[in-house]
Amino acid sequence: MAGIPLSDDYPVRRVPVVTYLLITANVAVYLLSPLSQIAVWYGDVFSRACAQELYLLHWAAIPAELLTGDQLRGATECPGADFGKVPWLSTLTSMFLHGGVAHLLGNMVYLFVFGPCVEDRLGRLRYLGMYLVSGVIACYGFALSEGPIEVPMVGASGAISGVLGAYLVVQFRSRVITLVFGVIPVRLPGWVLVGTYFVLQYLLYVSLSLFPGEDTQTAYAAHVYGFVAGVVGGLLIYRIRWRAGARLSDVH
């Protein structure tokens, strides 16, 4: 992420219920998962390792499964791997999985700062739809870019990138207090912060395409595709709302 946002100066007109529910769901899923260190009910270190492996195979999005439409078989020797899985549904469930506390907090901070504004401008149901669709497109975009690899994808960053893309459309004039380099508070125009985020993700995505041997645990391609999906979704939804509002005004 390009800086740590702290607050947005856009005054929302109502409580951003959907954003708060998404944050709550992400936090709850992580705390209850075998990936959380406080989830002691998964047993000793060996039992937890198997629980984590099965958990990711079951609920994470795996590019090889998304491209073929078939569930991977024989990917683990842990007992209990005889579950059924619908690969495309894993693009939805994977949005609520996170590999660690830092991963979770980084995503939730961005959602907390930018989500309320986008929810307010698009409307709750449209915002939720845009969030989920952006996450799905991010997963498939990554799979198409990387090929049929068997590495599980987790995290809400693709969907949150969609929120940032929509923010660029609906409220780019806002100012956002941001910690630059993690320590210097600066009041930046929203479009600067969001635009810098996209450029950085795109450059990292391109660099990995040019040097495919580089090892990374970050799906930059998913961020790029999610952001573009958010821009397109924001344009379509916001324009439809604006035109509908104009027609209502004409009637009255």
Image (tube, rainbow, N blue to C red):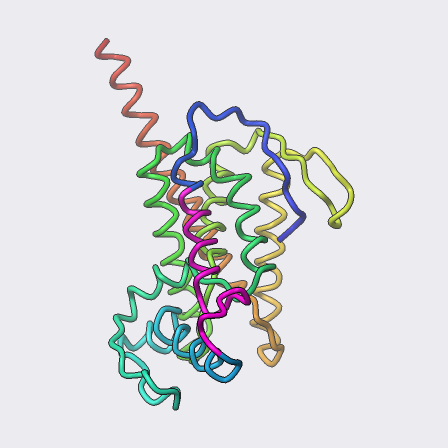
Q: Residue at x 46, y 44 (%)?
A: 163
Vertical side of 80 occupied by 113: above or below: above
Residue 125 versus residue 170: which sits nearer the camera?
Answer: 125
Hey, which residue is sitting farthest right in the picture? Answer: 184
Residue 221 versus residue 114: which sits nearer the camera?
Answer: 114
Q: Is residue 246 magenta?
A: no
Is residue 27 found left or right of 79 in the rendered image? right
Residue 44 versus residue 79: which sits nearer the camera?
Answer: 44
Vertical side of 73 occupied by 90: above or below: above
Is residue 250 found left or right of 107 in the rendered image? left
Quarter of the picture holding the C terminus: top left
Q: Residue at x 44, y 52 (%)?
A: 159
- The image position of residue 1, as x and y in percent, is 62, 53
Vertical side of 87 occupied by 190: above or below: above
Q: Residue at x 29, y 71 (%)?
A: 87
The image shows a total of numbered marks equal to 0
Magenta segment: 21-43
Hey, which residue is sitting farthest top in the picture? Answer: 252
